[in-house]
Structures are given as structure tokens and as C-alpha cells.
């Protein structure tokens, strides 16, 4: 576990005039039928148009979660669903913050280390790569 209580995991937006909290959301898991096998899992999901103001990131952007499962696996569509909930609404989140939140939620759900890596394609052929190991 992260050592951080679930209720304490939250994000404060950068807007100093209106510091709203985005509550921590759980990542869905399923039982690993073969925990004794040395397995590495990488789940990759598209992450496009999340910012309600700029429409960034652009087509071709992804977020990947890599971990070595023991008794639990992240449900196949859980990251996609988590991102949809996280980016719903009119409040913009930094792309780097999204990666950090996904990493904390996955670590909490699995109770073991994870790596989350995002490749963000932006306008004018810019690319941002952000990774978190926790």
C-alpha cells in the first residue's frame, strides 16, 4: 500500500481562487488466477481530448500502466473508465497530474509498485513523456 489513506489521496487544482478537491477514485481489480507465475502486465489506453479548454492531448496519446501482479489484476477497462471519470467536467488537470493520480490509484488498488507512463501528443508536433514509479 502507499501508506496514504484513501480518503487523503486527492488533488487540489492550481486555481488559487477556487481550490476544489477532486476525490480519490478506486481502480477496479479482478483476482489473478495464477499468482505464482512471474508475470508482467502492461495496460495501454488512449488518452485524447481530456482538456475541456484546449482539447489536448491529441490523437495518438496514451497512458500505460505496468506492474507485476500478485493476487490482483487491474480490470481491462479500468484505466479507461478511471480517466473518463477523472477528466469529466470543466476543470482542467495538468497532464503530469493525471499520470500521478493514475499511479497513486493503481498502487492503492494493487498494494504493490506500479509504473505509469504517458505519451502526450500536442499541437505543433510537440510531445510530452511523463512517467511515475510508485
Image: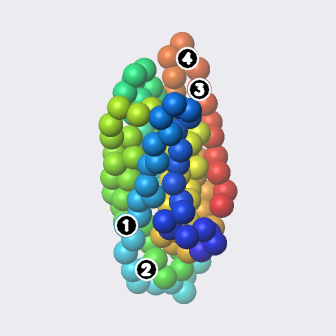
**Disc 3 on helix, strand or loop?**
strand
Circles 3 and 4: CB atoms closer than 8 Å? yes
Q: Residue furthest right?
A: 133
**Measured Cα–Cα span from mark 3 to mark 4:** 6 Å
Residue at (38% x, 40% y) in the render: 87
Counting from the top left corner in percent of width and height, residue 40 is at: 56, 67
Counting from the top left corner in percent of width and height, residue 133 is at: 67, 56
**Measured Cα–Cα span from mark 2 to mark 3:** 35 Å
Residue at (56% x, 56% y) in the render: 103
Q: Which residue is mark 2?
A: 32
Q: Which residue is mark 1?
A: 28
Q: Which mark is residue 45?
A: none
How crowded pointer 3 is (Cα within 10 Å; few <14, some 14-19, many 20+) is rated as some
For the N terminus, give its image quadrant: bottom right
**Disc 1 on helix, strand or loop?**
loop
Q: Which residue is mark 3?
A: 127
Amino acid at each position: 500500500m502507499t501508506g496514504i489513506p484513501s480518503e487523503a489521496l486527492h488533488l487540489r487544482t492550481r486555481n488559487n481562487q477556487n481550490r476544489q478537491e477532486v476525490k480519490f477514485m478506486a481502480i477496479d481489480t479482478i483476482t489473478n488466477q495464477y499468482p505464482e507465475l512471474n508475470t508482467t502486465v502492461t495496460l495501454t489506453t488512449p488518452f485524447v481530448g481530456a482538456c475541456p479548454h484546449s482539447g489536448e492531448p491529441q490523437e495518438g496519446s496514451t497512458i500505460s500502466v505496468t506492474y507485476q501482479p500478485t493476487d490482483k489484476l487491474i480490470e481491462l477497462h479500468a484505466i479507461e473508465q478511471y480517466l473518463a471519470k477523472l477528466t469529466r467536467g470543466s476543470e482542467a488537470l495538468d497532464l503530469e497530474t493525471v499520470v500521478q493520480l493514475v499511479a497513486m490509484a493503481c498502487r492503492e488498488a494493487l498494494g504493490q509498485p506500479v509504473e505509469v507512463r504517458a505519451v502526450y501528443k500536442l499541437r505543433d508536433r510537440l510531445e510530452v513523456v511523463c512517467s511515475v514509479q510508485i
